[in-house]
Amino acid sequence: MSTGALREAIIHFELYRLLKDCLDSGGFSVPCQVDVEPERLAGGRSVDLVLICRERGTCLSVIEVKGRSRGELIIYDEAVEEQARRYAEHLKAPYYIITNGVILRLFRYPCECVGNYYFQLSKTCVRQFLADFFSLYTGEKTDLNLRRAPSPSEIEKLTNALIQSIIEALEEISKNPSFRLETKIARETKNYYLSAGDLRRVFRLGIPLKDSREANTCVTIELNEMRRKLSEEDLKELLRNLSQIPGFEWITGINLKRRFVWKYMVYHKRVDVEKVKKELAMWFISLLTK
């Protein structure tokens, strides 16, 4: 199931369905019968999901769900962590979880991060998570067997490396008289606009000035400008080529009828900075030769 831009309610429903199905199927090594309960009240607000012991009515963990349409880094936001921690405190839960259906963050109350993990809304992954979590809860394990995802500091480092390579490619290509690079501040975001020949502001890189994990660096491709000059086949070829550059894989499968396409710049793997700079500069040049 793809969750590229899913709203919170969709992820919430699918995760509840999968947890309920796996728990009802049984087969876990856990000291009590566990169920999942949606929208449980805690301090005047409702918790998205709660893992509870049916016999005792005690809470094992609260689960806070966030949608990716609000920004991919929102699950790393300190305010979200504090919200989940307060829910755990109110319900006396020893663990609390934050997930957007792609990454799962597990905490031990009051504020110990057990780990950040890649996660999938699939029965196989949810069942693996539950088996590992129950072993963690009973003290048999100290970690989950899910693949580790980057920590907030690691994401920041990897993302900054990619952003810097894009900036350097923009600055290098702007030395060519056929290009024009503008920088402007708008709504606390520093924007880099690149015009190529008569294609005005065809590429934009927006970097937030505020230090906030909710404020994401964003790349925008102006499709209307490109359609004005290019045939549909040429446009498709250009975008295919762009999607092969590290950090731009998200371009694949975009809707060409839109005015523009954009993507939050959140990168979860190491980049070859020099390769990105070289290939992106070559792609900018290709805008003039179509």
Image (cartoon, helix red, strand yellow):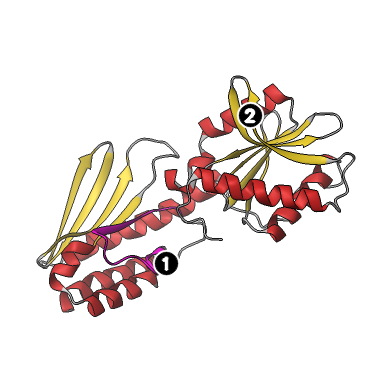
| Vertical placement of residue 46 versus 146, above or below | above
In percent of width and height, residue 286 lies at: 22, 75
Look at the image and tell me whether residue 271 can be seen: yes
Q: Which residue is mark 2?
A: 85
What residue is drawn where x is 19% and y is 62%?
224
Q: Badge 2 local density, few (<14 within 10 Å), some, or many (20+)? A: many
Crowd rating for badge 1 (residues with CA inside 10 Å; few <14, some 14–19, many 20+):
some
Asked if residue 38 is positioned above or below residue 140 in the image, the reply reads above
Please determine whether, in this image, residue 277 is positioned above or below residue 109: below
On the image, the x and y values in percent for residue 97 come to 65, 39
> Is 178 situated left or right of 214 in this image?
left
In terms of sequence position, does the residue under pointer 1 or pointer 2 come before the other? 2
| Quadrant of the frame with the C terminus | bottom left
Give the structural element (helix, strand or loop) at label 2.
helix
Q: Residue furthest top?
A: 43
Q: Which segment is the magenta one?
A: 249-266
Q: Residue at x 88, y 48 (%)?
A: 29
Q: Which is more toward the observer, 261 or 264?
A: 261
Foreground: 89 or 124?
A: 124
| Mark 2: amino acid | Arg
Compute the Cα span from label 1 to label 2: 35 Å
Left or right of 231 in this view: 273: right
Q: Position of residue 76 (x, y in %)?
A: 53, 41
Q: Residue at point 47% right, 46% down?
A: 7
Element type where label 1 sits in the image: helix
Q: Residue at x 82, y 34 (%)?
A: 54
Q: Nearer the viewer, residue 64 or 195?
A: 64
Task: From the viewer's perspective, tell me whether residue 51 is left or right of residue 201.
Answer: right
Residue 249's disc is 1
Q: Position of residue 265 (x, y in %)?
A: 40, 53
Amino acid carrying label 1: it is Glu
